[in-house]
Every structure is written in C-alpha cells, then in structure tokens.
Amino acid sequence: DAVTWTWQWIPTYDVSLDLRLDALAELMVLMAAGVGALVLVYCASYFRDDTPQLGRFAGNLLAFAGAMLALVLADDLITLYVFWELTTVFSYLLIGHGSEHRHSRRSALQALTVTTLGGLAMLVGFLI
C-alpha cells in the first residue's frame, strides 16, 4: 500500500504539501538517494578541507538532493512544480559554484535558462 503524508501549507487557499510513497516512488527514491550518496562520497574525496566555500557547496548539494527526493514523492501538481523549481535554483547554485571562472557562470546561466523554460512548459501543460 502507498504511504501518504499531507501538511496544510496555505490553508486559506486549500494548498497543501502532499507526498506519496508507492512502489514506483520508492524505486525513484532509491535511485535519487543512491546517486546522491555516490556524489557526496566522491565530493568528500575530491575536495580538500581548505577548499573555499565548501560548506556552502555541501549545503547546496544536500538541498538539491532533498528537492529531488521531494520531487519524486510529490503527490499533486503544485508540490511537483514547487520542487521542480527548487531543483532549478539549486542546480544553478551548484553549477555556478566556481563563480570566479567565466565558464562556470555561463554554464550556470545556461542550465538556469533551460530548466526554467522546461518549468514554464510544464506549468503551461498543467494549466491546459
């Protein structure tokens, strides 16, 4: 059986945060958590302790992984869209981590543009 969880986010407008864990979501959670764990293990061996802004990068990486997990658990369109946009923001921050390099800033802006356009297309599809 599926496990569901609901939290009234904006009760005045009947907007809630609904998450659902069923067999397919469980498979996707295992995939997202597995890849996320592998990335964290790789980052632990890749970065040194004196790497500048390492804490910010690690926080963004964990927030991205959390947004991805919530994205695969989303049980309604509003929740799905909110977590999609959160993954957009966190991917921008992760790609642009080395902002002192021009190619990092350009790549981050390109990723932001592509994922934002994808999110807008998804929103139009939801509205239609």
Image (tube, rainbow, N blue to C red):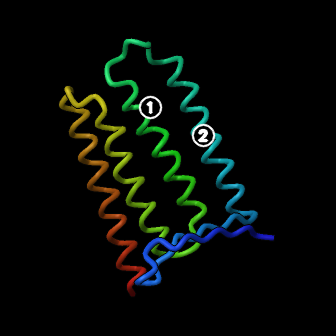
Q: Point out which mark residue 35 bears.
A: 2
In the rendered view, tell whether residue 115 sits above or below residue 62.
below
In the rendered view, tell whether residue 39 sits above or below residue 80.
above
Amino acid carrying label 1: it is Ala
Q: Residue 56 at what x, y percent from top left? A: 36, 32
Q: Residue 119 at what x, y percent from top left? A: 36, 66
Figure quadrant of the C terminus:
bottom left
Q: CA distance from mark 1 to mark 2?
A: 15 Å
Amino acid carrying label 2: it is Val
For image coordinates 52% across by 74% down, the residue present is 8
In the rendered view, tell whether residue 101 sits above or below residue 61.
above
Pointer 1: what residue? 58
Q: Could you say which is closer to the camera, residue 9 or residue 35?
A: 9
Q: Residue 108 at what x, y percent from top left? A: 28, 42
For image coordinates 46% across by 79% down, the residue present is 11
Quarter of the image for residue 36 reads top right
Q: Point out which mark residue 96 bears.
A: none
**Crowd class of label 2 (few under 14; some 14 to 19; many from 20; radius 10 Å):** few
For image coordinates 47% across by 71% down, the residue present is 9
Residue placed furthest toward the bottom: 128
